[in-house]
Each structure stands twice: as C-alpha cells, then as structure tokens.
Amino acid sequence: MTQPSAGTFSRIPAATLPVWLVEDDADVRDSLSQWLEVSGLEVRTFSRAREALKALQSDQQCGVLISDIKMPEMDGLALFAAVQALDTPPPVILITGHGDVPMAVAAIQQGAWDFVQKPFEPERLEECVRRALEHRALALENLQLQQALRHNYLSTRLLGDSAPMQALRRQVENLAASRANVVINGETGSGKEVVARALHDFGTGSQGTFVALNCGAMNSDLIESELFGHEKGAFTGAGERRIGRLEVASHGTLFLDEIESLPLSAQVKLLRALQEGEITRLGSNQVIHLHLRVVAASKENLLEMVSEGGFREDLYYRLAIAELAIPPLRERREDIPLLFRHFCHQAAEVHERPLLEPTTQLLGALGNHRWPGNLRELRNIATRFILGLDLPWQTSLVPNHQSCALSARMEAFEATVLKEALQRHAGNIQAVLEELDLPRRTLNQKMQRHQLRREDFLAP
C-alpha cells in the first residue's frame, strides 16, 4: 500500500475494495462472481491458489479473499496459512463441504474471518463478504493513519526540509519496518545516533532495548567483554558477572558507533555471533540465543578500509544489508535556520533563559560557515547564543571573499528569505508575492531552484 505523505489521510470506501475469489470449478467460479458483481462488488477470480498468493505477495490490493478448501496443488487451508504470513493479510472466507467443517472451524480459531458451507444461499455469502470488507477498510484506514502519524513524528526527529533530508526520512521510514542490519555513514556530529534511534523507535523491535556502544571509546582489551559479557573470575579483574551488550540488545537494537575502530579480533567474533545468532559469555559454556538488529555507524569509508585490510569484508556485508548516508550540514544549508531555532528552543528550556530570535544577518552568516562539527557544532553555537556568550565563530562565520564566493552567499541568503516568508504565511503564495514584491513567475523559478515546495509549508 502506498504510504501517505505527512498530513494526508482519506477514508477508504469498503465497497471499492476488490473481492478475490479462488475456485477451481469454472461453473461455480462464474456463478459466484456474477452474483457478487450484480450486488455491486468488484470481483477478481483465480482458478488456482498459487496464482492468488503470488498476486497478494506482489502487494496487489485485496479487500477480502474467498477460497474453496478442496483444490488441487494448494488447497484453501494452505492458502490461508500463507496469507496469514503477509504483513497486512486480508480477511479470508472459506467455502467448505460438510466433511471439511471441523477444519474450517479450526481455521477460524487461527484467524480466518468465516466460512460458508455448501450448499449455501448467495445472500449468506454476500452478507459475510460485506462485513469482512468493512473490517478490512477499517484496518487499512488505521494502518494509513499510523503511517501518517509516524511520518509526521519522524519529521520532528530528523529535522530539515532540504531534498537530502526528505530522502533520508523516506529511507528511514522504509527500513524501520524491517529487521535488516544497517550501516550509517556520516561525518562527526552529523547525527548518526539520532538516525539509529529513529530506526529503532519506528521499527518492529521498538519494544526491545536500544543499546549503544562507541567502539572508538573502548579499550581494545575490554571490547570483547563489553560485547559478549563475562562470568565472575573469567579473567583478572572480573570480580562479578557482566551481561554483554549483544545480550542486552537481544529483541531490540545494538548501535555500534565508530565501527571502524573495532579491532580485527573482535570483528571475527562479532561476525560469528551474527551468523550463528548466539553467543557465550567469556568464562562460560552456556549458549545464549540472540535476535537483534545491528545498526553500525562509521565516519570512514568501510569499503576502502576493506581494500586496505583494516576491516573484514565478510563483516561489512553482514552489517551493510542497507546503507544510509547522512548529508553534512554544509550540503543542506537551507535547513540551518530551522535547526538553529530548534537548538535555541532547546537551550532556552534547559538553561531557563528567554528565547532569542536570530537576526537575518546572523542567519546569513550561519549559512556561510563550513560547519566541520556539523549539528554538534550548530547546537553549541545556539547554546552560546541563548546564554549571551561571546561566539567563538564570529570571525570564521562572517562572510568573506576568501571563504565563500559572493554568488554562494547571495544564494544562501535568498533561500533563507524565501523559506522564512513561506513559513510566516503558511504557504500562502499570494501573501509571499506581496511581501517580497516579486512576480509570480520569478517566485516560482526561485522556489524551484532552492527546492522549496508550497505544500511543505501549509498549516496542518
């Protein structure tokens, strides 16, 4: 099902959802489909269960699935079991003969919607189908609403309206629903742990624990104990049992920051643990089974490290089922005003200081800085600004011809002015035209050049 964009939601009319009929007897299939179509329902027919299952697995829309139980190759019960394994299975109605009633009752106990026993009145089947369609429509509406809420909430976690950030949010939203291991690439301070937490919080393992370990901050002699845990007396200094991070993160997410710093000896053992799905604590023979997602973050190019012998190739491919790249702040300058104000709000609350509004000149200067420390550096500047402290970047952020060309500074300033006007007027183009005294065609061209969309500024 197509995921809704933020702020969009529409009801799904039950009668518009197609009814799928799986029946190997052509006469029965034709008569039932004709009756349902005369009743105003859209019907799609299949002569074999495997054909219907293949269509369902390709994410084709189905309102309710009606299936005969007695069929060659794959019967209705096997089809029902396969349908139950789908992410959003449709209600299943089984058509059964007298001798199959006990099996149909058992299927209902396992989640089937209902069954009709041959011979049956068509009105009985139609009534059953309409109730199932209403249930399916409600379930799809709830799913759509959850996705819309998740999309909106994700926008407050991964801030930014720039094209790279919008693409990143879409990737996170897609990957969060899986349990695939992920490698996050990004510079220092770019927000890798924020992305990792978003993958966990919006994912299927969100009920489990999110466990973070900075591999670069650990003593190489202790990293294996941290990962796998140890028993009391396992080595000198092991005065008590310690549960390892892998074990704590089971059924949740293990975030390994600066994975490039993990010693090769620990890489071998981590790979084995992920391959086998089990570990033993140091000094113990007890096998502990694992079920977790690993999200690893690196500021280095791991494939280059593989070619240089600094990182194991097999571990890289075990971890990098998917990869996410976080854009550095200098590549999404249009997000800086929004981010700076956000960090100012946070600093004002934490330090109980009045909120200060940055001047246009300050925002322009912020937009021209190179930001080697990325979000971490911007947060630091916002805190100093709120506290009224001298800003250490005053000379480095002030635009000059050596650090930034005039055209680039003018582009950054123009993007900031346009975005602020759109935000003030909640996407009202006529109001923006009047405030900036621009022809509509000029405004359209500038918005397109700066990748600004009116829809992103509309009031919710």
Image (tube, rainbow, N blue to C red):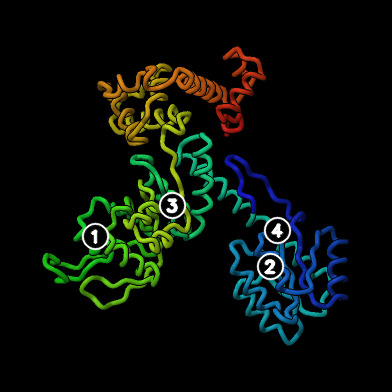
What secondary structure is found at the residue carrying circle 3? Answer: helix
At a point 36% along the width and 66% down the height, the residue shown is 271
Badge 3 amino acid: Asp
What secondary structure is found at the residue carrying circle 1? Answer: helix
Q: Are marks 3 and 4 in contact (CB under 8 Å)?
A: no
Q: Is residue 140 left or right of residue 341?
A: right
Residue 201 circle label: 3
Q: Position of residue 22 (x, y in %)?
A: 76, 72
Q: Nearer the viewer, mark 2 or mark 1?
A: 1
Q: CA distance from mark 4 to mark 2?
A: 12 Å
Pick the front one: 37 or 369: 369
Q: Residue furthest top?
A: 437
Lower position in the chain sequence, tag 2 or tag 3: 2
Q: Position of residue 224 (x, y in %)?
A: 25, 63
Residue 61 circle label: 4
Q: Residues within 10 Å of mark 2 (few under 14, many from 20)?
A: few
Q: Are marks 2 and 1 in contact (CB under 8 Å)?
A: no
Lower position in the chain sequence, tag 4 or tag 2: 2
Badge 4 amino acid: Gln
Q: Are marks 2 and 3 in contact (CB under 8 Å)?
A: no
Q: Is residue 288 left or right of residue 45?
A: left
Residue with the mark numbered 1? 223
At a point 80% along the width and 77% down the height, the residue shown is 24
Badge 1 amino acid: Ile
